[in-house]
Image (cartoon, rainbow, N blue to C red):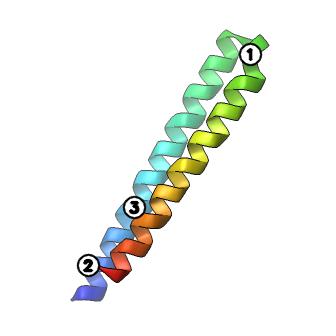
Amino acid sequence: MTGTLAAVGAGLAVLGAGLGIGQIGGRAMEAIARQPEVSGDIRTTMIIAAALIEGAALFAIVGAFFF
C-alpha cells in the first residue's frame, strides 16, 4: 500500500512540474513575440524558473518515496 501511494505522489509531482514548465514556455513565447528585443532576458529567466521547478519536483519525488 505504501509503495502505491508513493508512486501516486511521485506521479502528481511530475505532472505538476510538467504543467508548470509548459506554462512558463508558453508565456515566454508570448512575451518574446510581443517584445522581441528582450528575448535574451526572457529566455534566461525562463530557464532559471524551469530549473527551480525541476528542483522542486525532484524533492517531491524523493520525499514521496522516503516519507
Task: Find out whether the residues at labels 1 and 2 contact each other: C-beta distance under 8 Å.
Answer: no
Task: Give, as a three-letter code, the residue at label 2.
Answer: Leu
Disc 3/disc 1 C-alpha distance (Å):
32 Å
As displayed, is residue 42 above or below residue 25? above
Residue at mark 1: 38
Give amino acid for label 3: Ala
Q: Residue at x 64, y 32 (%)?
A: 45
Q: Distance between the residues labelled 3 and 2?
A: 12 Å
**Residue 3 drawn above or below residue 53:** below
Q: What residue type is labelled 1?
A: Val
> Looking at the image, which is closer to me, 33 or 63?
63
Q: Quadrant of the C terminus?
A: bottom left
| C-alpha span from label 1 to label 2 | 44 Å
| Residue 16 in the image: above or below residue 45 | below
Precedes in sequence: disc 3 or disc 1: 3
Q: In which quarter of the image is the N terminus?
A: bottom left
Q: Which of marks 3 and 2 is nearer the N terminus?
A: 2
Instruction: Find residue 21 and report its horizontal and vertical position in percent.
Output: 53, 44
Residue receiving disc 2: 5
